[in-house]
Image (cartoon, rainbow, N blue to C red):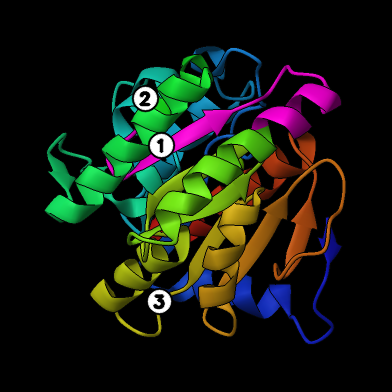
Amino acid sequence: MKILKKDLNIHSFLRKIAIAPKTILLLDYDGTLAPFRKQRQKAVPYIGIKEILTKLINLDNCRTIIISGRPAKDIRMLLDLDKYPEIWGCHGAEKITSEGNHVAAKLSFETREALNEAALAARQEGFWNRCEQKHSSLALHWRGLSTREIKQIKSRAEKIWNSITKRKNLTISEFDGGIEIRAKGITKGTAVNTILNEIAFDLPVLYLGDDFTDEDAFDILEKRGLSILVKSEYRPTKADIWIKPPDELLAFLSDLIKVLGENNE
Ligand SMILES: [Mg+2]
């Protein structure tokens, strides 16, 4: 573990967790709880994560929420648990509550039409087979391609999708393993903001993520919570702490359970 902010006092943050009625634990999935796989549908969690999540879900003083770019139902399938946490999918555009209820943000007709236009362009340009259609976005995945192939497919997609984002209320963003065209104003940052608005202002909040898309969440949490970059190699980040998966991640979450458990007794 490496502390990235000079003025951060992790022990005082843990002491806060130890006495708080509820701690909010926000977790990204791909690259954070699960290693990347060429075949995305096979990206199961690191060994030990399912047990840790089960313990966390059973703690009354912790609200565990997974926030992912994937559809929420995909995360449920990959986790394969007896009991699930709350899962916010598609960067917060939809969610499945811990009771299993699905809730999705309503998109305007214009946004849906623009996303259909982006899909049609992907078909015409011949990269539809690498696209994933989601509630509020269309993602192009290039994991497994050579650097040269990635450069080619990226510039093709950006060219045709840029012509759409110039006219419509969509935006293009990059993530680890691809790019995505999605409705403007839906980011992990807005998802975290929604959660912060639902809870008491003094509850401890933690966010663990690996990707560029998690930086929006780190940004929102600045001075409000603890943000943790989970990544094998360091990259510039707004996070407070950097940990390497899976060992440091498992140790961090186990220590957190210990602190929460003592409070829960
Ligand atoms: Mg990720």
- Placement of the N terminus among the 4 image quadrants: bottom right
Q: Which residue is mark 2?
A: 74
Dot 2 or dot 3, earlier in sequence: 2
The question of residue 7 being in magenta is answered with no
Q: Amino acid at mark 2?
A: Asp
Q: Residue at x 65, y 54 (%)?
A: 212
Is the residue 215 above or below the residue 45 in the image?
A: below
Q: Nearer the viewer, mark 1 or mark 3?
A: 1
Q: Is residue 137 magenta?
A: yes
Give the x, y percent position of residue 84. Answer: 31, 33
In the rendered image, the quadrant that contains the C terminus is bottom left
- Specify which label sits upstream in the sequence, 1 or 2: 2
Per the image, the residue denoted by label 1 is 138
**What is the C-alpha distance between the residues marked 1 and 2?**
15 Å
- For the residue pair 85 and 154, the one nearer the viewer reads as 154
Residues rendered magenta in the picture:
134-153
Q: Are marks 1 and 3 in contact (CB under 8 Å)?
A: no
- Res 141 → quadrant: top right
Give percent across and percent down for residue 133.
35, 29
Image height of 70 relative to 131, above or below: below
Q: Nearer the viewer, residue 175 or 261?
A: 175
Is 49 displayed left or right of 152 in the figure?
Answer: left
